[in-house]
Amino acid sequence: MSKGNISKIDNLGRVVIPKSIRKALNIEHNDQISMYVEGENLVISKGFQICGICESKNIKFQLGKKFLCSKCIEEIKNL
């Protein structure tokens, strides 16, 4: 299924996710979403993410499609 819409960003940097798209993804008020850049595209997906190394839900960084917590970032720096 493919849904699409055109929206404008307001003066505070916000954009509205249209009701048809929220409904298609079952996104409701106060749900968490994830955003990342892939090439020239902004990708928005529903749900919380977990650290790709330790599976912590306390995400602080995103590298492409991968999410990392502060603890794992520090451990990588110390390698």
Image (cartoon, grey):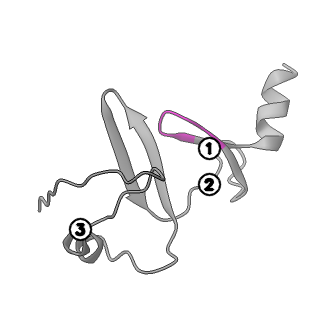
Give me the C-alpha separation between circle 2 and circle 3: 24 Å
Mark 3 surroundings: few (<14), some (14-19) or many (≥20) residues within 10 A: some
Give the vertical position of 42 relative to 56 (above or below): above
Q: Secondary structure at mark 3?
A: helix
Instruction: Tell me the amino acid under the disc marked 2.
Output: Ile
Q: Secondary structure at mark 2?
A: loop
Mark 2 surroundings: few (<14), some (14-19) or many (≥20) residues within 10 A: some
Q: Magenta segment: does it hold 65? A: yes
Image location (x, y in percent) of residue 20: 19, 73
Give me the C-alpha separation between circle 1 and circle 2: 6 Å
Instruction: Give the foreground label among 2 and 3.
Output: 3
- Read off the residue under disc 1: 52
In the rendered structure, find residue 50 and report the number of the disc placed on it: 2
Q: Which residues are magenta?
A: 61-66
Q: Which is nearer the eye, 19 or 43? A: 19
* Image quadrant in which the C terminus is located: top right
Instruction: Tell me the amino acid under the disc marked 3.
Output: Ile
Give me the C-alpha separation between circle 1 and circle 3: 27 Å
Instruction: Specify the principal SS of the magenta part.
Output: strand
Tally of numbered discs: 3
- Read off the residue under disc 3: 21
Whether tag 2 and tag 3 are in contact, CB under 8 A, the answer is no
Whether tag 1 and tag 2 are in contact, CB under 8 A, the answer is yes
Give the vertical position of 67 relative to 21 (above or below): above
Instruction: First in sequence, mark 2 or 3: give its number.
Output: 3
Q: Which is nearer the eye, 51 or 5? A: 5
Q: Magenta segment: does it hold 45? A: no
